[in-house]
Image: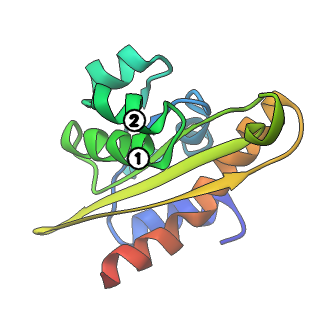
């Protein structure tokens, strides 16, 4: 996919409702979708859970997962995605957590997870990607990347 509009059209074509569970991107993923005319047909809701407490309270992320793997880990992103899937009417969820600015090798590291519920099938995929640039550039790049990957995540999950 080359544009957010194409992703929104993809969601509409497959009759998928999207929810997001965002930490580092703080709502940018859902905002990019909402910018597209007709997005109301495919966007269910967005959770912005920045703090560990919000991730636990709003999405059911386990304190033990945060303690064991760290707040900015694929494991936390996966629990965020599954929590949003359970707490929404969405068929597919994009979740993000990461560090937009940090010292050393963790600078720009973003963990993205995608969870899906189709009929009786539920699945999840995740990846860690590193972006460079200013804080807000990393956030913007991570949000766009997650959306552009959504069709790929969908196909991976549908085939598993």
7 above or below 103? below
Q: Position of residue 121 (x, y in %)?
A: 17, 70
The percent position of residue 82, horizontal first and vertical second, equals: 28, 47
Percent position (x, y) of residue 47?
Answer: 40, 29
The structure residue drawn at horizontal position 48% and vertical position 49%, both measured from the top left corner, is 74
Quarter of the rendering containing residue 156: bottom left
Question: Mark 2, mark 1: which one is toward the viewer?
Answer: 2
Residue found at x 41% / y 47%? 75
Task: Choose top left, top right, bottom left or bottom right for residue 123.
Answer: bottom left
In percent of width and height, residue 79 lies at: 33, 42
Q: CA distance from mark 2 to mark 1?
A: 9 Å
Q: Say which of 129 and 85 sits in front.
A: 129
Query: Where the C terminus falls, by quadrant?
Result: bottom left
Query: Residue tagged by mark 1?
Result: 75
Marks 1 and 2: in contact by CB < 8 Å?
A: yes
Please name the colour scheme applied to the rendered image: rainbow
Residue bearing mark 2: 68
Taking the image as shown, residue 71 lies to the left or right of residue 68, namely: right
In the image, farthest residue toward the front: 68
């Amino acid at each position: 996919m080359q544009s957010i509009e194409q992703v929104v059209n993809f969601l509409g074509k497959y009759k998928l409702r999207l929810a997001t569970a965002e930490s580092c991107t703080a709502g940018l993923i859902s905002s990019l979708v909402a910018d597209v005319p007709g997005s109301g047909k495919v966007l269910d809701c967005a959770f912005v859970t920045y703090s560990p407490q919000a991730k636990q309270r709003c999405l059911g992320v386990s304190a033990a997962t945060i303690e064991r793997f760290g707040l900015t880990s694929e494991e936390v992103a996966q629990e965020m995605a599954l929590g949003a899937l359970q707490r929404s009417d969405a068929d597919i969820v994009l979740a993000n957590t990461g560090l937009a600015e940090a010292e050393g090798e963790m600078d720009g590291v973003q963990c993205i997870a995608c969870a899906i519920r189709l009929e009786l099938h539920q699945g999840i995929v995740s990846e860690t990607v590193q972006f460079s640039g200013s804080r807000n550039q990393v956030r913007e790049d991570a949000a766009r990347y997650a959306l552009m990957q959504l069709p790929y995540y969908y196909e991976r999950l549908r085939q598993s």
